[in-house]
Amino acid sequence: MQLNTVIFDMDGLLIDSEPLWGEAATEIFGGYNFQLTKAQYATTTGMRTKEFVEWWFNHYKIDARHNAIAENAILQSVVDKVAAKGKALPGVAHIFNFFIERNFKIGLATSSGKPLIDVVVDKLGIRNYLQSIESAANLPYGKPHPQVYLNCAEALNSHPTQCICFEDSFNGLIAAKAARMNCVVVPAPHDSKNEKFNAADLKISSLVNFNSLLLQTL
């Protein structure tokens, strides 16, 4: 089938929010007397906050009764931080213009909830270009489960094989491929040489680098 739909992840792809998520996690987890190393944090990138907290609280033997409190504190902290100092990652304007010019349907499929989605979408000025915004926050399973991508394709009236997904995390990459979609991955610079990203259809260092020749390879 001919490609006619593009679906974007949000955190770490369109908005430089991953460092802010890290800051929030460090602050909140510090109150429970543990901190994550960069390597530990990287293993759970792309998870929903609920699963992220559950994973590390279980790992560090923190009473599960604290999970919801920590989750809400991290979520609110990230919303505040992104509103105050979140910045678009390089190439956001370019990539949206690229697909708008080619009359692609455009969607957003993110693990984040509505409060953060609203802040990011309005900060980046992309709301009017998105025909569908789908969140995995309240789904039974988040990424790497493909449901959020399948929901977005359905909302756009697109078959999964007509879709290109842009992701930055391995969990997101697996979700896109499980949905039978083409996936372009833009890993964080510190993780760009990790061989796990070879599972993507295409790996680029920045959204700025995507062009018509690369589109033809998909």
Image (cartoon, rainbow, N blue to C red):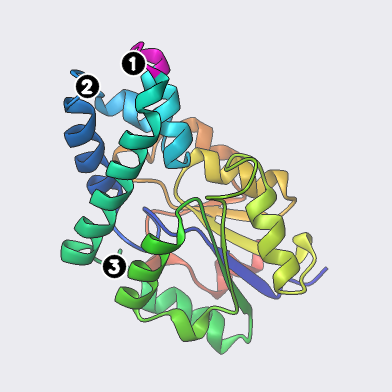
Q: CA distance from mark 2 to mark 1?
A: 8 Å
In front: 176, or 209? 176
Residue furthest front as drawn = 65
Question: Crowding near pointer 2: few (<14 within 10 Å), some, many (20+)?
Answer: some
Report x, y in % for residue 158: 76, 71
Q: CB of mark 2 within 8 Å of CB of mark 1?
A: yes
Q: Earlier in the sequence, mark 2 or mark 1?
A: 2
Instruction: Answer left or right for 55 relative to 171.
Output: left
Report x, y in % for residue 121: 39, 73
Type of the residue with mark 1 = Ile
Report x, y in % for residue 210: 47, 67
Residue furthest top as drawn = 61
Residue 116 against residue 131 in the figure, above or below: above
Q: Which residues are magenta?
A: 58-63
Q: Nearer the viewer, mark 1 or mark 3?
A: 1
**Residue displayed at 33% across by 62% down:** 15
As for residue 56 lying within the magenta part, the answer is no
Placement of the N terminus among the 4 image quadrants: bottom right
Which residue position is annotated with label 1? 62
- Is residue 39 visible to the viewer in this orientation of the structure? yes
Secondary-structure class at tag 1: loop
Which residue position is annotated with label 3? 88
Which residue position is annotated with label 2? 32
In front: 67, or 118? 67
